[in-house]
Amino acid sequence: MTNAGLFARAQAAIPGGVNSPVRAFRSVGGTPRFLVSARGPYVTDAEGREYVDLVAGWGPAILGHADPRVVEAVTDAAARGLSFGSSTPAETELAELVEERIAPVEKLRLVSTGTEATMSAIRLARGFTGRDLLVKFSGHYHGHSDGLLAEAGSGLATFALPGSAGVPREIAALTLVAPYNDLDALRAVFAEHGDRIAAVITEAAAANMGVVPPLPGFNRALVDLAHAHGALVISDEVLTGFRVSAAGWWGLENGTDSAYTPDLLTFGKVIGGGMPVAALGGRTEIMDQLAPLGPVYQAGTLSGNPVAVAAGIATLRAADAAVYEQLDATAATISDAVSAALTAEGVAHRTQHAGNLFSFVFGEAVAGGVHDYAGVLRQESWRYSPFFHAMLEAGVSLPPSVFEAWFVTAAHDEAAIGRVLDALPGAARAAAS
Ligand code: PLP
């Protein structure tokens, strides 16, 4: 069946034809590709067309798709049973792997999705501090739980409005939304509400409004400010964790002048190697407030699922220093080539980097770079759709929105990168028109 036929059929059976909204191509238009297999740097659709993939399952596939080591670990685990609902030795092994790499994680609790991880971390922060308010940054995404879908109201740093139908105003009003990378705004929030704030949650490096890295020292200053007011910091590494380095974004800043120590960290994506594993971790004193030791309830039938955990362990073990070097080099090659192609066609733009994550903002207004959501929104976002479709037609699958990061894998070899480079001149021309 064609992609169009499959989409029509899916729309009759599934709301919008998708199980997660961005997959519907609403922001770029056109028909989503229905994928049937993926291997290495390639994905194949139901019409038998192969694409070089720069989505990587939205991040997890750092080794490339269906890496034989991961597939073998999953197959072995599956043969021993799909789900026990009981403790397993592998869960502890995965927790230890994370704790060895990321010093602020003294204990780790496994869950199944990033949404669950952030939701549980917030409950834990509230339980630990005995306070109610949460601060988040405009343009940061932490999953789809009620308090985190809050949108900024008008004004610099405000009590939030519901960002979705179905979120009660009273819930949204427990979240304060502040502009990213703006310490003065954050100081103002703490000056006014400091004794009621349980935690600040921040993407360790923002990558859900396109890539917007923290300004040097921002994470550290934010931790200092929160701690001065008795609040915790939740560093959300669902996207950056084990992707930008073996120790995530924390690892990139650790040992530098801007080193920081968050109280809680959340993980997802790479930690499950493409299977549903996510986690929250942090200081023992805080983590031990979780049930059964402490009064903060948190649980899950599929938490620590043995097949999923096997994929996570195999992925983390295989991702050695050489893998991260290669991810960095590939990200640089592709992002430089995109930038050169856009420049050749006279398209004003800026490459936004956070480690090996990157994206592009378009237009003169943002060509100097952007540091917050308001900046991101000033771009000529309409240039992305023709660029995206020209790449897709040429056999390269990009994230279907200008507000998403691009993801490379260690399986992107010369042949795959070459196909991306070949597609760029035509796509840049499309973006220029
Ligand atoms: N936090 C961040 C930084 C994310 O990028 C995401 C998902 O993209 C989430 C949380 C939510 O994770 P999940 O989609 O697994 O619920």
Image (cartoon, helix red, strand yellow):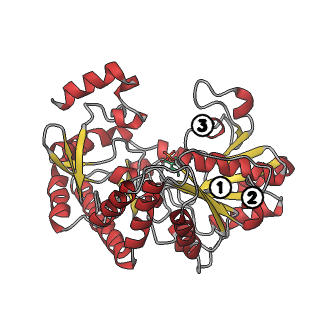
Is residue 374 at all visible to an observer of this figure?
Answer: yes
The single residue placed furthest to the top in the displayed view is 12
| Label 3 Cα crowd, 10 Å radius (few <14 / some 14-19 / many 20+) | many
Secondary-structure class at tag 3: helix
Amino acid on which the number 3 mark rests in the picture: Leu
Mark 3 C-beta closer than 8 Å to ligand 1:
no
Mark 1 or mark 2: name the one nearer the start of the chain.
1
Q: Residue at x 83, y 58 (%)?
A: 229
Secondary-structure class at tag 1: loop
Amino acid on which the number 1 mark rests in the picture: Asp
Q: Are marks 1 and 2 in contact (CB under 8 Å)?
A: no
Q: Residue at x 47, y 43 (%)?
A: 378
Q: Picture coordinates of residue 253 (x, y %)?
A: 56, 73
Q: Are marks 3 and 2 in contact (CB under 8 Å)?
A: no
Measure the alpha-carbon separation of dots 1 and 2: 18 Å
Name the residue nearer the viewer: 162 or 81: 81
Q: Residue at x 66, y 57 (%)?
A: 234
Q: Picture coordinates of residue 272 (x, y %)?
A: 45, 57
Name the residue nearer the viewer: 247 or 315: 315
Secondary-structure class at tag 2: strand
Is residue 371 at all visible to an observer of this figure?
Answer: no
The single residue placed furthest to the front in the displayed view is 80
Residue 150 in the figure: left or right of residue 422: right
The residue that mark 3 highlights is 149
The residue that mark 2 highlights is 232
Please tell me whether residue 258 is drawn above or below residue 354 in the rendered image: below
Amino acid on which the number 2 mark rests in the picture: Leu
| Label 1 Cα crowd, 10 Å radius (few <14 / some 14-19 / many 20+) | some
The residue that mark 1 highlights is 182
Q: Picture coordinates of residue 111 (x, y %)?
A: 57, 51
Query: Where is residue 11, by image quadrant?
Result: top left
Quadrant for the N terminus in the image: top left
